[in-house]
């Protein structure tokens, strides 16, 4: 029974790792930068969901899409105002000063944490649950009703992202820009618009995860910091820029942590991912699903 | 030219000397500056920091209304310790060397206190520990450091007594991975072994920044202990409580949940735990049913008037920290460190929570107020304010097991 419990719990955790990591890996695929404020998009989603419901009384099924919209808007504004100046004017992608992106997004992360701390306050807020069922018994496994619902929605959105990337023209445009920005622009695709859209989608996905988990994680100013660290591990593990890799690595990390915490030591739980990461980088540096090299 | 150079240097030195004399004169006649370090931003406990700030400000205002210290106004120079020892250390350094504070107080996280007292010792500045519970702070034996706050040994002894009186067989403790959490869990095991050697005790450390404790909770489902003890601070403690409740581990018909971190008097407690908090047993350093000196009543009234809610222990602890320093300076007739430290060593002062004296016994009791009052109460209803929670162990008495409400009743 414990094995089943751990597997189910690990997979549930993994779905949220994957949801967070997909947005991060999409940004890396398109812009070749790491967004260090990704955890704060998640935090903003958790607060939006919670405060709209508890302070303004908006129904939870409306606050969830509202959280996505706010996260997407934040992502879009970030790309337009902070990211775009970094590569504007450069005809070659290779000249982009991506080291500035690290500093800018890190600064944005600190700004958002402290802004929320001062404006909303330091106290954690627990979001309302999507369904009012405290415990659901699935055979020997007990799960919170909200957690089950959130996991189901998370899986649905991940499937939606795959379908979008594979079957829509816009998804193919994203892939084209990821493969060759200059080539894509010669084919009539506007890389700037795609970049902004991907940043918005990334912000929306992170905020969606934050909103879904708000009743479990209790929104607080630094709620995204730890989750973001896990997302970075998942992205590198899965292969930077690979959506499929992010999903597989997220689920794998969730289950590995779950079992490792019980059968090795809970104290080392957060190091398992890093150990796996080091092993993968030693024997498969491009990650599980990454490409060995990209050259144009 | 040579002479001019020397003249210039002499003038500069004279100017500097005048400026320093002027500063010293200004410090003697200006406000008495007391440094206050607490968490104003994450990852420190900003919730605690906010309460400490409120308590210090109330005490400052009350002191200033009564003439301040030695006839001079009290000024709090506040710094953000961020719950990070390196930040606390640099804050203490800045307060002493740049701001010229005559004493430091306010810190509420043990790891930070341990860093800051090194600076206080180096500069020989009185340091009043507001809420660092770790015994290691006392065991350093620094003459500059005074502890009117609670301490791990006190909590562990109290909790061990309560657990022994509950007549249980097994206890699992979850402690945060800090000096405070690990120290308290180890002491609880030690005192439980003395008071109730038959109780099967073990503890697990959890990362206070984590948002998922399921792997620690799930193994308890198959073999639930009689009591789960919490030694984590919010927000991690809230998440742990919700996950214990979600999995049906505790509180449940078979397992009590016992908190040693004072969660129930946090203003956001019920908003974050809901049903998971019902029947929680709580170690409490403040309960309105406890008898309190007149100064405590005044601080309580001032807090309620200013913030519109019930005070909690941190308000009184912070106020006592500042009142003690003020009293010592007034009695010593100076703000100079050595006379103030000597006065504090022999002080007998009735603050907000009782009459405070400091032990000179080495170890955990060094310069510690040993008789910090405590009670145990139980939250019998969801959303119940602390003032309405029944006491199951009154100050200075043993637990009355007949008063306990079984989870599931």
Image (cartoon, rainbow, N blue to C red):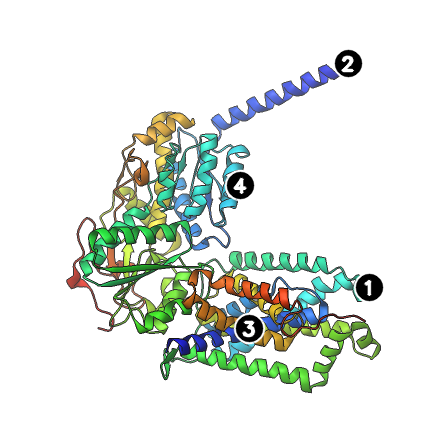
Q: Which residue is mark 4?
A: B90
Q: Residue B294 location in percent, x, y?
A: 26, 43
Residues at circles 2 and 1 in contact by the CB criterion of under 8 Å: no
Q: Chain of mark 4?
A: B
Quarter in which the C terminus of chain B is drawn: bottom left
Q: Residue B370 location in percent, x, y?
A: 27, 41
Q: Secondary structure at mark 2?
A: helix
Give above or below for A269 relative to B372: below
Give above or below for A204 relative to B210: below
Q: Which residue is mark 3?
A: A250
Q: Chain of mark 3?
A: A
Q: Which residue is mark 1?
A: A90
Residue count near mark 4 (Cα–Cα under 10 Å), binned few <14, some 14–19, many ≥20: some
Residues at circles 2 and 3 in contact by the CB criterion of under 8 Å: no
Mark 3 and mark 4: Cα distance apart in space: 39 Å
Mark 1 and mark 4: Cα distance apart in space: 42 Å
**Quarter location, residue B139:** top left
Q: Residue sitting at 50 percent across and 28 percent down?
A: B27
Establish whether labels 1 and 3 are both on one chain.
yes
Label ID, residue B2: 2
């Amino acid at each position: 029974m414990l094995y089943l419990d751990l597997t189910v719990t690990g997979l549930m955790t993994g779905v949220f790792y994957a949801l967070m990591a997909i947005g991060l890996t999409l940004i890396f695929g398109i812009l070749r930068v790491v967004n260090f404020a990704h955890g704060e998009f998640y935090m903003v989603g958790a607060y939006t969901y919670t405060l709209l419901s508890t302070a303004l009384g908006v129904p939870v099924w409306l606050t969830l899409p509202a959280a996505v919209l706010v996260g997407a808007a934040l992502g879009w504004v970030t790309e337009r105002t902070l990211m775009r100046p970094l590569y504007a004017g450069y005809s070659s992608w290779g000249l982009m000063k991506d080291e500035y992106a690290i500093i800018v997004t890190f600064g944005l992360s600190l700004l958002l944490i402290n802004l929320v701390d001062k404006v909303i306050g330091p106290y954690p807020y627990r979001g309302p649950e999507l369904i009012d069922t405290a415990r659901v018994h699935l055979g020997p496994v007990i799960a919170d009703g909200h957690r089950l619902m959130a996991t189901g929605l998370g899986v649905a959105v991940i499937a939606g992202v795959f379908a979008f990337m594979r079957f829509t023209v816009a998804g193919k445009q994203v892939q084209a820009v990821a493969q060759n920005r200059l080539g894509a622009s010669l084919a009539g695709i506007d890389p700037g618009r795609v970049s902004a859209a991907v940043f918005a989608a990334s912000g929306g996905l992170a905020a969606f995860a934050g909103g879904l988990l708000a009743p479990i994680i209790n929104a607080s100013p630094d709620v995204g910091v730890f989750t973001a660290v896990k997302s970075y591990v998942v992205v590198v593990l899965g292969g930077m820029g690979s959506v499929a890799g992010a999903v597989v690595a997220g689920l794998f990390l969730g289950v590995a942590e779950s079992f490792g915490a019980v059968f090795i030591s809970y104290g080392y739980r957060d190091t398992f991912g890093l150990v796996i990461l080091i092993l993968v980088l030693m024997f498969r540096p491009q990650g599980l699903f990454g490409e060995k090299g990209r050259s144009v | 030219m040579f002479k001019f150079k020397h003249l210039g240097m002499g003038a500069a030195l004279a100017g500097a000397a005048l400026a320093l004399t002027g500063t010293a004169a200004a410090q003697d006649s200006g406000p008495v500056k007391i440094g206050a370090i607490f968490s104003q931003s994450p990852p420190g406990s900003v919730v605690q920091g906010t309460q400490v700030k409120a308590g210090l400000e109330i005490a400052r205002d009350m002191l200033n209304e009564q003439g301040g210290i030695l006839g001079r106004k009290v000024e709090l120079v506040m710094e953000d310790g961020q719950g990070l020892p390196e930040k606390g250390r640099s804050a203490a350094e800045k307060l002493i060397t740049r701001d010229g504070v005559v004493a430091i107080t306010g810190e509420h996280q043990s790891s930070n206190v341990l860093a800051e007292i090194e600076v206080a010792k180096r500069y020989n500045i009185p340091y009043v520990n507001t809420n660092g519970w770790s015994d290691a702070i006392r065991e350093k034996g620094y003459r500059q450091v005074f502890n009117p706050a609670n301490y791990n040994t006190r909590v562990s002894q109290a909790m061990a007594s309560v657990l022994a009186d509950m007549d249980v067989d097994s206890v699992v403790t979850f402690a945060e991975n800090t000096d405070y959490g690990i120290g308290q869990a180890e002491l609880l095991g030690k005192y439980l072994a003395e008071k109730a050697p038959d109780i099967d005790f073990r503890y697990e450390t959890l990362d206070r920044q984590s948002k998922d404790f399921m792997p620690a909770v799930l193994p308890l489902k198959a073999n639930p202990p009689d009591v789960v003890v919490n030694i984590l601070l919010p927000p991690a403690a809230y998440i742990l409580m919700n996950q214990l409740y979600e999995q049906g581990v505790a509180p449940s018909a078979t397992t009590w949940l016992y908190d040693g971190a004072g969660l129930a008097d946090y203003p956001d407690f019920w908003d974050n735990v809901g049903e998971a908090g019902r029947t929680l047993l709580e170690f409490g350093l403040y309960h309105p049913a406890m008898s309190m000196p007149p100064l405590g009543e005044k601080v309580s009234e001032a807090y309620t008037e200013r913030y519109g809610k019930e005070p909690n222990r941190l308000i009184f602890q912070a106020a006592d920290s500042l009142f003690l320093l003020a009293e010592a300076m007034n009695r010593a007739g100076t703000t100079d460190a050595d006379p103030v430290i000597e006065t504090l060593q022999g002080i007998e002062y009735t603050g907000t929570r009782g009459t405070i004296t400091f032990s000179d016994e080495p170890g955990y009791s060094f310069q510690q107020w040993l008789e910090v009052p405590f009670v145990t109460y139980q939250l019998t209803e969801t959303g119940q304010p602390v003032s309405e929670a029944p006491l199951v162990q009154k100050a200075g008495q043993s637990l009355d097991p007949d008063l306990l409400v079984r989870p599931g009743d």
